Image (cartoon, grey):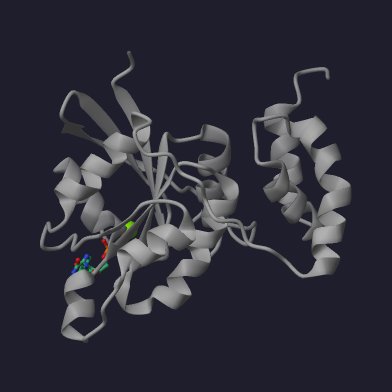
Amino acid sequence: MRNEYRIALAGNPNTGKSTLFNALTGLRQHTGNWAGKTVSLAQGSVSFKDKTFQLIDLPGTYSLFSNSTDEEVARNYIVFEKPDVTVVVLDATSLERNLNLALQVLEMTTNVLICINLIDVAEQQGIAINERLLTNRLGVPVIKISARNKKGFPMLLDTIDRIVSGAIECHPAQMTYPDEIEAQLKKIEPKVSEFVGNHLSSRWVALRLLDGDEALLNEINKRLVPEGG
Ligand SMILES: Nc1nc2c(ncn2[C@@H]2O[C@H](COP(=O)(O)OP(=O)(O)O)[C@@H](O)[C@H]2O)c(=O)[nH]1
Ligand SMILES: [Mg+2]
């Protein structure tokens, strides 16, 4: 049985992704954000029980469309490199804004863990978060942590462990769009499905195509269409 798993960290900028990455891996990845053409992905490992989790610190982004190189890098990693689990790190003090990215990830892939960070700051501000209610609504595990204080790590690692071992099944909640869009989706999703098979979520690809995401289409052509095919 395999005992090495890839765990990608996604999230808005400044949600503490690098702080979490460094605390778990013992590495000192630069914390701070920069925009640039060459986006390198920091990688480091953490051992848990009999397993090794290879963590990948994706670029911080507000969405996962094709607006910037950072967004494309993060999106391509999640859908084409297919990490075993995608951990979406959220800022507990601005959940409403942060959940936007989380919902996008839930459309793209199945094995998702929502990690609500900066819980210490939220508590100081009197913000209470019901993670069980969120888990039920989102269909994937929701864990509260404080990366800076190294709080909540055992639960986080244990939940990752239970996702990769199949003890927890993720059923990510899917957004329902206005009737007009759903009707279009119904028409094109079967055709998309023929094309992408089970490599990608056909609903997600269909949504991106409706949005005119040519960069994604090019990426699919590059990665999924066999040479000479
Ligand atoms: N109070 C508090 N601050 C945190 C926590 N996690 C991260 N930070 C701080 O939030 C800022 C952004 O963190 P960083 O890891 O660079 O975020 P990234 O942009 O998502 O990689 C830094 O000043 C961190 O020290 C936390 O759990 N509690
Ligand atoms: Mg960072």
Which residue is at the front of the view, 170 or 27? 170
For image coordinates 76% across by 18% down, the residue present is 227
Which residue is at the front of the view, 90 or 218? 90
Which residue is at the front of the view, 6 or 128? 128
Q: Total marks drawn?
A: 0
Left/right of residue 111 with respect to residue 56 in the rendered view: right
Left/right of residue 194 with respect to residue 219 in the rendered view: right
Q: Quadrant of ligand 1?
A: bottom left
- Residue 189: give x, y in percent of width and height: 81, 45
Quadrant of residue 196 in the image?
Answer: top right
Image quadrant where one finds the C terminus: top right
Relative vertical location of residue 1 with respect to residue 120 in this rendering, above or below: above
Residue at the top extreme, as displayed: 1
For image coordinates 69% across by 40% down, the residue present is 219
Quadrant of residue 190 in the image?
Answer: top right
Residue at the bottom extreme, as displayed: 125
- Residue 18: give x, y in percent of width and height: 27, 55
For image coordinates 17% across by 33% down, the residue present is 48
Left/right of residue 226 with respect to residue 8 in the rendered view: right
Left/right of residue 131 with respect to residue 189 in the rendered view: left
- Residue 117: give x, y in percent of width and height: 27, 64
Can I make out residue 60 in this image?
Answer: no
Can I make out residue 89 in this image?
Answer: yes
For image coordinates 23% across by 26% down, the residue present is 51
